[in-house]
């Protein structure tokens, strides 16, 4: 029952936001809906972690460990972004445009919430396509030439990916002909041993290529830096923080099905493609000129890391993968909130134009630095722990080359991020900038930064037991 | 056996005699569609008679090729007529003298001599048209090859009479390979016979001529033979398309003269329907610019290859 | 029903042939109008195949899907494009492309061959009469991807996406004719929404950037940073 409520609330909020009820209604309603969804999702996740079975319509709408984790993450990032939007989007003068933003925002969130809840793959495809479509308006929100270009590239490449994945899902459906299990993730796992491996392999390839475009895996990643930098900041946080992870989740759901046949070496595919993405993203980070694109490339890198970790096999590596998913979502959304604060302060996206941020607007500078360090994987913050656990499981499993390459690429990216941020945050500020008054950031933005930053620090030192249990269940969800 | 030979000769006479009529009907219909009255359908006969009664003027610089070409161009389609099913659906006496590939080569021989003759005189428009004809010809060759190859593979033989038996039942008729083959072959006819969109058969502008340029220098007997040969080539191609690929019915099955005579109007009916389609195509498309002809024939090539793929890898 | 099977099979072959031919036509045409016309033809061929499978398999659910597709793809989507994309975009007679037409056709041929060779060994088709749908649909998908890559204009890229979906669906009805109805219905609606959104996006692109030649958009590359 609660699951339906989680889906319906944002839809209602979308409708209310769309109605012309003044400038204040939409943000308030959105934020309220997101908070309620967050509470409900958290409750569902706790129930799953305690071992109970949460399902609304059996075989169609169900939550297991992995799904609960992702659902919770969607809710968290959506709430944080809604809070940040309050202050950030309030600058927009046109009330109609504002309302449409919030309406689309709610629709976007609703479709994202649907993905981990649905267990029927064809419906999952539909939900993922809907997230793509609702995101288009949000990416083009700024209405500049660059934003429109980014929205175009985004829509064309991701919709093409969706169309290719469609065929993959239909081929996957074919697998149900070989037995009596229903067409759901768990049903497919039981069926897998009896299905000819060609069928599953071709389905996986199609879905990997198609949804890989949506995740931003190289070589179909070209839209990601554009879209994730030109969109308004809260949308970037949503896109980078959770939407790409969501599509990666769908790909990860296929891994246990393929493992169950026992005859396909799918791990190799995952590792190779993951490593390529990490490597290329790491080197692209070095030559970036726009700080939002910096974090976008970092998203590509982390998607690659998660895929590689999932491909390494074994519960330990899979635990590392889901841990990385958790930490990446929280940290990356914080990073984008920080860039939003910086953008409000200096009004330019170019790294070369920003200097001495710590002096001109201390809050933005500190947030940016903190976010950069966190996402690069410095101890004692969250991402460091998850990356370390991946490395450890890789060495324990004797995948020395993979782990070595992964570590090398992560170090390259680390230096790249810090190099750029260092110049931005420290360094000589231009006289004009130091003389002018610091821009006052909206209170909601600052509040979001604090609220979003806290978990990163906390998770670096302490892991609450229910969360640990949830992560373990999620890891099993990839393994079995 | 004599009957078989006789029917073969009858087929030749059929094509020989009715080619100008087909040409006349085609031009008349085109004119009618364009809201004009058009010449009488028997006008080509009158033209031929007029030309046969005129003197021939031959350049002093022309070699023996120039004099021989009209005969080659005239005989080539006749030769091919003996190989293809025009009136009967069982093989006649000369049927095994050559197969479809051989027939294609013989028609190409006629075109080859025509191009040589056009270069033979010192007329500047001759070589220009000849080079263009060769370009169209060389682009059309792969299509010919693939169409013939696919048809032979599907039907299990290269002799037109035996191929014709294959599509009489509806078994394979709507298979994609068959439909695509027909489309490719129609595009080929448009190219080889010099119809719109490849070339304008009624044009008088020498700079734009492709196929017409082969008869620029001829007069009298030569001109008559070239014209007649061209008309017969079109009729032969149409017969191959209709009697072998598209509508292999209505041909004489029995061995008496009456059967064969009864088949003639049916064949004319089929040709008439195809003429209608041809008129529609010609009146609704514009002539392609020269460099777009390669795209047109490229599309025909791709269609024929796809027909080959779907035909060979059929399930 | 049994004695109709061969006839239905050959008619389905006809539909598949028309589908493939219109896929090639999409690549061979230079005009904007040509793209839309060939897309219409391809959608009609797809609807025809769906009808035939619905009658031949028999799967009555598919008739609803066929009707829905008939309403949306050949009719609604071109209308939507007409309505939302600026008029002058449709009057374009020369589309910018990366390869010239004969090369595009040759590449398309290679892709079709690849599709045939990939699809034949897989034991995928669930409906015997629709055996030809699998390679043809896959070929349509690959041709759509190529069209997306090789065309530089907004509307042909969009039609490329639709061609990919058409190909997926053509293969899909042969592989999984009994997919749950709710999922089958979702697909054409999805395309409708895509058409609407992209139509509007094209209009906005036209207004903001001044042209719909999206292949020439380079403002976001690192090398052209201001």
Image: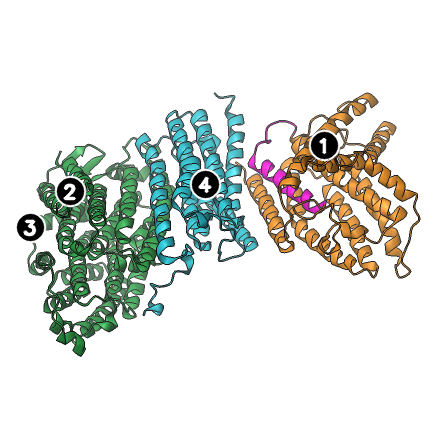
Q: Which residue is mark 4?
A: C137
Q: Which residue is mark 2?
A: A21
Disc 3, disc 4: CB below 8 Å?
A: no
Mark 3–mark 1 distance (CA, rounded to whole Å)? 86 Å
Residue B176 screen position, x and y as percent: 56, 36
Q: Which residue is mark 1?
A: B271
Chain under callout 2: A
Vertical relation: A57 (above or below) B125: above
A383 left or right, relative to B186: left
Mark 3 vs mark 1: same chain? no
Chain under callout 3: A
Residue range highlighted in magenta:
B168-193
Residue B303 drawn in magenta: no
Q: Quadrant of residue C165?
A: top left
The residue lying at 66 percent from left, 52 percent from top is: B139
The residue lying at 20 percent from left, 42 percent from top is: A18
Residue B231 screen position, x and y as percent: 78, 41
Q: Nearer the viewer, residue A316 or A93?
A: A93
Residue B183 drawn in magenta: yes
Callout 2: 10 Å neighbours few (<14), some, many (20+)?
few
Chain under callout 1: B
Quick one: SS at disc 4? helix
Mark 2–mark 1 distance (CA, rounded to whole Å)? 73 Å
Mark 4–mark 1 distance (CA, rounded to whole Å)? 36 Å
Mark 3 vs mark 4: same chain? no
Disc 2, disc 3: CB below 8 Å?
A: no
Residue B251 screen position, x and y as percent: 74, 27
Quick one: SS at disc 1? helix
Q: Which residue is mark 3?
A: A465
Mark 4 vs mark 1: same chain? no
Describe the colour scheme in one phrase: by chain
| Image colour assigned to chain C | cyan
């Amino acid at each position: 029952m609660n699951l339906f409520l989680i889906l319906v609330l944002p839809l209602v909020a979308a409708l209310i936001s769309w109605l012309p009820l003044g400038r204040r209604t939409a943000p308030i309603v959105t934020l309220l809906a997101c908070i309620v969804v967050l509470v409900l999702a958290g409750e569902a996740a706790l129930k799953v972690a305690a071992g109970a079975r949460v399902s609304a319509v059996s075989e169609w709408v169900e939550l297991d460990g992995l799904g609960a984790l992702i659902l919770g993450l969607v809710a968290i990032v959506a709430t944080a972004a809604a809070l940040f939007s309050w202050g950030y989007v309030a600058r927009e003068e046109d009330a109609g445009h504002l309302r449409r933003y919030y309406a689309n925002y709610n629709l976007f969130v609703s479709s994202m919430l649907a993905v981990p809840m649905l267990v029927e793959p064809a419906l999952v495809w539909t939900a993922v396509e809907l997230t793509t479509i609702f995101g288009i308006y949000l990416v083009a929100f700024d209405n500049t030439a660059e934003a429109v270009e980014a929205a175009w590239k985004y829509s064309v490449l991701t919709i093409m990916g969706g169309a290719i994945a469609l065929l993959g899902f239909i081929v996957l459906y074919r697998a149900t002909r070989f037995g009596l299990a229903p067409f759901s993730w768990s049903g497919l796992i039981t069926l897998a041993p009896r299905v000819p491996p060609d069928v599953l392999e071709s389905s996986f390839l199609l879905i990997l290529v198609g949804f890989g475009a949506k995740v931003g895996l190289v070589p179909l990643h070209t839209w990601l830096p554009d879209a994730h930098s030109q969109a308004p900041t809260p949308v970037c946080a949503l896109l980078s923080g959770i939407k790409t992870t969501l599509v990666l989740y769908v790909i990860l759901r296929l891994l246990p099905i393929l493992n169950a046949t026992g005859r396909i070496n799918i791990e190799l595919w995952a590792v190779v493609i993951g490593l390529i993405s990490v490597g290329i993203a790491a080197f692209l980070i070095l030559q970036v000129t726009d700080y939002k694109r910096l974090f976008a490339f970092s998203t590509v890198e982390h998607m690659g890391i998660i895929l590689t970790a999932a491909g390494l096999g074994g519960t330990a590596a899979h635990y590392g993968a889901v841990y990385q998913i958790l930490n990446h979502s929280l940290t990356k959304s914080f990073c984008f909130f920080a860039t939003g604060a910086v953008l409000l302060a200096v009004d330019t996206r170019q790294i070369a134009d920003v200097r001495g941020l710590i002096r001109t607007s201390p809050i933005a500078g500190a947030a940016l630095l903190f976010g950069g360090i966190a996402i690069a994987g410095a101890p004692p913050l969250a991402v460091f722990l998850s990356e370390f656990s991946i490395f450890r499981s890789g060495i324990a499993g004797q995948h020395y080359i993979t782990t070595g390459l992964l570590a090398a690429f992560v170090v390259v990216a680390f230096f790249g991020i810090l190099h750029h941020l260092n110049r931005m945050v420290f360094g000589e500020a231009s006289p004009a900038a130091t003389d002018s008054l610091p821009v006052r950031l909206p209170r909601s933005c600052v509040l979001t930064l604090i609220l979003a930053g806290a978990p990163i620090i906390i998770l670096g030192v302490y892991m609450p037991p229910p969360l640990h249990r949830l992560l373990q269940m999620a890891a099993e969800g990839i393994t079995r | 056996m004599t009957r078989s030979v006789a029917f073969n000769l009858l087929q030749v006479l059929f094509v020989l005699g009715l080619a100008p009529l087909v040409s006349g009907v085609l031009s008349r219909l085109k004119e009618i569609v364009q809201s004009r009255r058009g010449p009488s359908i028997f006008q080509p006969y009158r033209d031929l008679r007029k030309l046969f009664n005129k003197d021939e003027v031959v350049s002093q610089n022309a070699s023996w090729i120039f004099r021989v070409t009209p005969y080659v161009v005239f005989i080539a389609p006749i030769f091919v007529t003996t190989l293809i099913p025009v009136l009967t659906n069982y093989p006649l006496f000369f049927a095994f003298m050559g197969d479809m590939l051989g027939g294609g080569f013989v028609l190409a021989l006629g075109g080859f001599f025509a191009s040589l003759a056009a270069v033979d005189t010192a007329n500047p428009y001759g070589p220009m048209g000849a080079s263009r004809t060769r370009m169209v010809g060389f682009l059309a060759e792969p299509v010919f090859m693939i169409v013939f190859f696919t048809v032979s593979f599907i039907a299990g033989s290269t002799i037109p009479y035996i191929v014709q038996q294959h599509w009489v039942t509806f078994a394979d008729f709507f298979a994609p390979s068959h439909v695509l083959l027909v489309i490719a072959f129609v595009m080929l006819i448009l190219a080889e016979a010099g119809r719109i969109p490849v070339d304008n058969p009624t044009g008088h502008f020498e700079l734009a001529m492709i196929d017409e340029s082969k008869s620029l220098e001829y007069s009298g007997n030569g001109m008559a033979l070239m014209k007649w040969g061209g008309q017969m080539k079109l009729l032969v191609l149409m017969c191959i398309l209709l009697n072998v690929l598209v509508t292999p019915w209505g041909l004489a099955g029995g061995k008496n003269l009456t059967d064969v005579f009864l088949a003639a109007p049916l064949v004319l009916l089929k040709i008439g329907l195809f003429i209608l389609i041809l008129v529609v195509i010609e009146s609704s498309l514009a002539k392609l610019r020269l460099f777009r002809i390669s795209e047109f024939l490229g599309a025909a090539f791709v269609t024929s290859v796809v027909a080959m793929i779907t035909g060979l890898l059929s399930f | 029903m049994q004695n109709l099977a061969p006839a239905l099979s050959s008619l389905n072959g006809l539909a598949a042939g028309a589908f493939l031919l219109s896929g090639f036509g999409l690549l061979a045409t230079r005009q904007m109008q040509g793209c839309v016309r060939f897309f219409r033809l391809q959608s009609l061929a797809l609807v025809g195949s769906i009808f035939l499978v619905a009658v031949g398999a028999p799967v009555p659910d598919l008739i609803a899907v066929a009707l829905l597709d008939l309403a949306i793809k050949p009719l609604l989507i071109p209308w939507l494009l007409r309505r939302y994309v600026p008029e002058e975009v449709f009057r374009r007679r020369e589309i910018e492309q990366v390869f010239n037409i004969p090369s595009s056709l040759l590449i398309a041929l290679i892709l079709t061959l690849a599709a045939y060779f990939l699809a034949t060994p897989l034991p995928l088709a669930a409906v015997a009469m629709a055996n030809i749908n699998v390679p043809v649909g896959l070929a349509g998908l690959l041709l759509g991807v190529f069209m997306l890559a090789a065309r530089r204009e907004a509307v042909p890229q969009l039609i490329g996406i639709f061609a990919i979906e058409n190909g997926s669906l053509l293969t899909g009805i042969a592989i999984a004719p009994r997919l749950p109805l709710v999922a089958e219905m979702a697909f054409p609606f999805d395309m409708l929404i895509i058409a609407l959104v992209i139509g509007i996006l094209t209009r906005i692109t036209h207004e903001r950037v001044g042209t719909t030649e999206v292949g020439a958009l380079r403002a976001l590359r690192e090398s052209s940073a201001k």
